[in-house]
Image: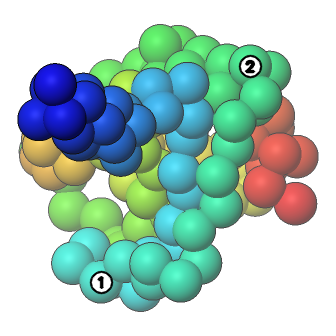
Amino acid sequence: MKRLIRLLVVALLLAACSSDDTNAVKLYEVADFDKVKKETVILYTTEQDVAVFEQAVEDAIQLPGIVDVYSPMYLFEAASKSYYLWLHEEGGSLMDVADTHTIYQLTEQSATTLKELLQ
């Protein structure tokens, strides 16, 4: 009986520790493509904030050709995917970390909303 209780406690602890927050976005500043500043992490957990990132990805427009870009400003992780993010005066872009040959242009609305959220 004690063994069963111990197994249940261990199982519950493992489940609690391994559950990732799929309704959250982690945003990091980036020094270079391979140098993420882990200490700069900001966690966005509200539905409204998470929706801003999801909408930006969903509405982004793939640009033609293979890209050669400067280092991204940010990296964000959402729903087990990671994206590089550039925001600038004229708008913004994102790139799936798993496909660094393709870049996506953010809509004007998404770029504006992200800039406001990150301020």
Residue at left offset 37%, top offset 77%:
36
Give the image quarter of residue 13: top left
What is the distance, in whole Å, between disc 2 and disc 1 at their CAs?
Answer: 29 Å
Image-based side of 29 in relation to 17, left or right: right
Give the image quarter of residue 7: top left
What residue type is disc 1 on? Lys
Residue at left offset 52%, top offset 13%:
59
Front residue of 75 and 111? 75
Query: Which mark is in front, 2 or 1?
Result: 2
Q: Residue furthest front?
A: 1
Residue at left offset 30%, top offset 36%:
9
The x and y percentages for residue 88 are: 67, 59
Is the residue under label 1 in contact with that under label 2 (CB below 8 Å)?
no
* Relative vertical location of residue 78 with respect to residue 72 in this rendering, above or below: above
Can residue 87 be seen? Answer: no
Name the residue carrying label 2. 47
Front residue of 77 and 7? 7
* Relative vertical location of residue 23 with respect to residue 43 in this rendering, above or below: above
How many numbered circles does the render carry?
2
- Callout 2 secondary element: helix
Give the image quarter of residue 81: top left
Image-based side of 2 in relation to 73, left or right: left
Mark 2 crowd level (few <14, some 14–19, many ≥20, 10 Å Cα): few
Front residue of 55 and 5? 5
Front residue of 114 and 62? 114
What residue type is disc 2 on? Glu
Q: Tell me the quarter of the image containing the C terminus.
A: bottom right
* Relative vertical location of residue 33 with respect to residue 118 in this rendering, above or below: below
The x and y percentages for residue 44 are: 69, 43
- Callout 1 secondary element: strand
The x and y percentages for residue 79 are: 38, 27
Name the residue carrying label 1. 35
